[in-house]
Amino acid sequence: MAKDENFDEWYNEIVEKAGLCDKRYPIKGMNVWLPYGWKIMQNIDTIIRNEMEETGHQELYFPLLIPESFFKKEEEHIKGFSQEVFWVTHAGKNELEEKMLLRPTSETAMYPMFSLWIRSHADLPLKIFQIVNTFRYETKMTKAFIRVREIHFFEAHTAHESYEDAEAQVKEDIEIAKRFFKKLALPILFSRRPEWDKFAGAEYSIGIDVLMPSGRSLQVGSVHQYRQNFAKAFDIKYEGLDGKHHYCHQTTYGMSERVLGAVIGIHGDDRGIAIPSSIAPIKVVIVPIIFKGHEEEVMKECRDVEKELKSKEISSIVDDRDKTPGNKFYDWELKGVPIRIEIGPRDIQKGVVTIVARDGIKKEIDRNELDKIKEELEEFDERLYKKAEKFLKENIHRIKKMERKEGIVEIPWCGKEECGIKMEEELEMKSLGTPLEKEEINEKCPVCGEKAVTWLRLARSY
Ligand code: ZN
C-alpha cells in the first residue's frame, strides 16, 4: 500500500484494513462503524465534550425529524440544503399530513424551541451542543468519513444579546478549535469563506481546513456568525434591560467525522494508520519476545507491566496471541497504536523495557520508570504534529500570477466576486477564503489589475 503513489486508493483500503469501518453495508455513503473506529471517534468526541463543558456549553439532544414547516422558515437555508435532504413522507401506507425531513443540520429543529426558551436577557447567553447523526444526500463520489450520507456530527449553537457578544463567541470557538485540533496533531487553517460560499443563512462563515497528502484541502469544521438572520425567521426574542424586545444574535460551530478522516489521511503511512495518543483506544501494546525456557518469566513480566500501565491510566494490552512477534508488530502498526513495548529475557535481565513508537523511534526505558511512557506518548503526538505542520507549510504557495500549484495557493485579490470566481475557474480550484489575520498587501489582483486588499486562498478540495 503506497500512500505516496495513490493516496485515495491507499485511504480507501486502509480504513477497512485497520478495522475502522466496513463499507459493504448496502446503502451508498452509509458505512458500519467497527468497534476500533467507533472507539477512536468516541475519544475524539470526549475531547470536544470536555472543551464544551469548560466553556459553559450544555449538551442536549434534539429529535432526528424536522417538520417541513420548520425547515422552510429561513429562505437561504432551504436553498442551500433542499437538494440534499432525505424526506419522510409516509407512515406505513398512509401519507403524512406534513412531510418531515431527516436533519441535515439542526438549526431549523432547534430554533423554534429557542424562541420558546428565551424570554429575557437573563436567559442569555444560551450555549448548547449535541453530537448526533445528520443526513445529507451527497451526489459526489462517497468516501469513508470524508463524504458520507449519514454523518457523525457535532454542532454547537449559541444565542446572545448583542452582535459583540456573538463575535466574542466566534473568537472563543476559534480558540476551542485551535486546542482541539492540536490534540489530534492536526495543523489547521482558518479562512473566512467568500460570500458565494458561506453557509446558507449565515452573515459570514469561517472554514477550518486541513491539507491532505493528496494535495487537496479538506474542510474539518466551520464557525458561523448568523447575526439576527435566523432569530428573525424563527422569532427568537428577549426582553432587554430597557424593557423592549430584541432579536438574538446567534452563532454555530460544527465538526464531523471528517476529523477522523483527516487523522487517518494525514498521519498514516504505508504500514497503516497512526493514532495520536490523545485519542488512541490502545496507547501501548506489549509484545512478549519469547525464548525457550523463559516463557513464564516473560509472560509474567508482560502482565506486570500491563497492570502498572493501567494503574497509571495508560490503556494497554498484552498481545498473547499465538503469532510471531513480527506478525504482531505488523498488526499493531496497521492499527496505529502509538507505542509498542517489547519484553524479552534480555530486557528482564537488564531491568529495562524496549519501546518502539509508531513512527519508528526506539528506546530503552528503565523498568522502574514506566512513568516516562507518558512523556513518550506526548512526544509522539508532537512529532506527528510537527511532521504534518511541515507538510502544510511547504504546500502553501503565495503566487502573484495565475499558475497551478500542488496544495494551497494564496493570490492577491481585489475582493470582487467576479475576480474570485475567475480564479476558481482558471485554476480549477475552489476558494477557501481569506486569512483571518489582517495583513498589509502591496500587490495587484492578477485578474483585473486593481489593488489587492487581501490574499485569496484556493485549493482543490474534497
Ligand atoms: Zn480583481
Image (spheres, helix red, strand yellow):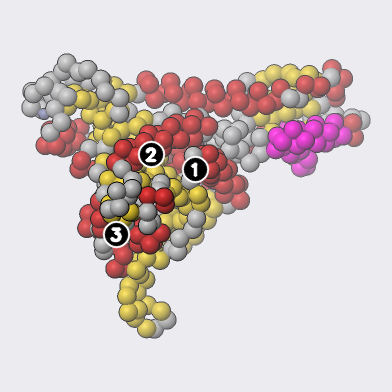
Position of the C terminus by quadrant = top left
Q: Secondary structure at mark 1?
A: loop
Front position in the image: 288 or 191: 191
The residue beneath circle 2 is 169
**Magenta-tinted stretch:** 299-328
Q: Earlier in the sequence, mark 1 or mark 3?
A: 1
At label 2, the amino acid type is Gln
The residue beneath circle 1 is 56
Q: Quadrant of ligand 1?
A: top left
Front position in the image: 424 or 157: 157
Crowd class of label 2 (few under 14; some 14 to 19; many from 20; radius 10 Å): many
Front position in the image: 196 or 57: 57
Q: Secondary structure at mark 2?
A: helix
Residue 300 appears in the figure:
yes
Q: Is residue 284 above or below residue 75?
A: above
Residue under the point 31% across and 56% down: 236
Would residue 144 appear left or right of 394 to someone viewing this image? right
Front position in the image: 287 or 160: 160
Q: Could you tell me residue 295's position as x and y percent?
A: 88, 33
Q: How far apart are labels 3 and 2 at the CA level? A: 21 Å
